[in-house]
Amino acid sequence: MLNTMRFEQEILPGQRSGAKAARRAATARDCRLPLRPIDEYVSVLAAKVSRHYRDDASKRIKQKVKAGESKTLAPVKVLRAKAAARSVDLMALLRKAG
């Protein structure tokens, strides 16, 4: 398509409409107006999705508990103690190597 316009005389000026429209700068309201329906839809959709996800998750959790597939979680203190026991003292290892 671009190869068909080789010469300057082939390029025509843009067509203007018959009535000269008064041009004005776009206001902030003009810029927000097209986005308003999208924002409203997104907020409604997000609420629905969040509610459906929460309902489905709680239903699945109840099913697992009823079927005896639930697991008990260890207290946070126990988990932190295990994590601390697994941590490696890098300074001690560097001193040994050096």
Image: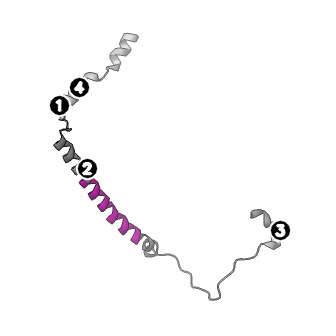
Task: Choose the circle earlier in sequence order: 2 or 4.
Answer: 2
The magenta-colored residue range is: 37-55
Name the residue tied to disc 3. 7
Name the residue tied to disc 4. 82
Inspect the image, locate mark 3, and give the three-letter code of the amino acid beneath it: Phe
Using the numbered discs, state the Cα–Cα distance from disc 3 to disc 1 in whole angstroms: 79 Å
Task: Choose the circle earlier in sequence order: 4 or 3.
Answer: 3
Most foreground residue, 70 or 88: 70
Q: Residue at x 36, y 10 (%)?
A: 96
Inspect the image, locate mark 1, and give the three-letter code of the amino acid beneath it: Lys
- Asked whether disc 2 touches disc 4, contact meaning CB atoms under 8 Å apart, the reply is no
Q: Which image quarter: residue 71?
A: top left
Secondary structure state at the residue bearing disc 3 = loop
Q: Is residue 57 above or below residue 48?
A: above
Name the residue tied to disc 1. 77
Between label 1 and label 2, give the one nearer the viewer: 2
Task: Choose the circle earlier in sequence order: 1 or 2.
Answer: 2
Using the numbered discs, state the Cα–Cα distance from disc 2 to disc 3 in whole angstroms: 66 Å
Secondary structure state at the residue bearing disc 4 = helix
Name the residue tied to disc 2. 57
- Asked whether disc 2 touches disc 3, contact meaning CB atoms under 8 Å apart, the reply is no
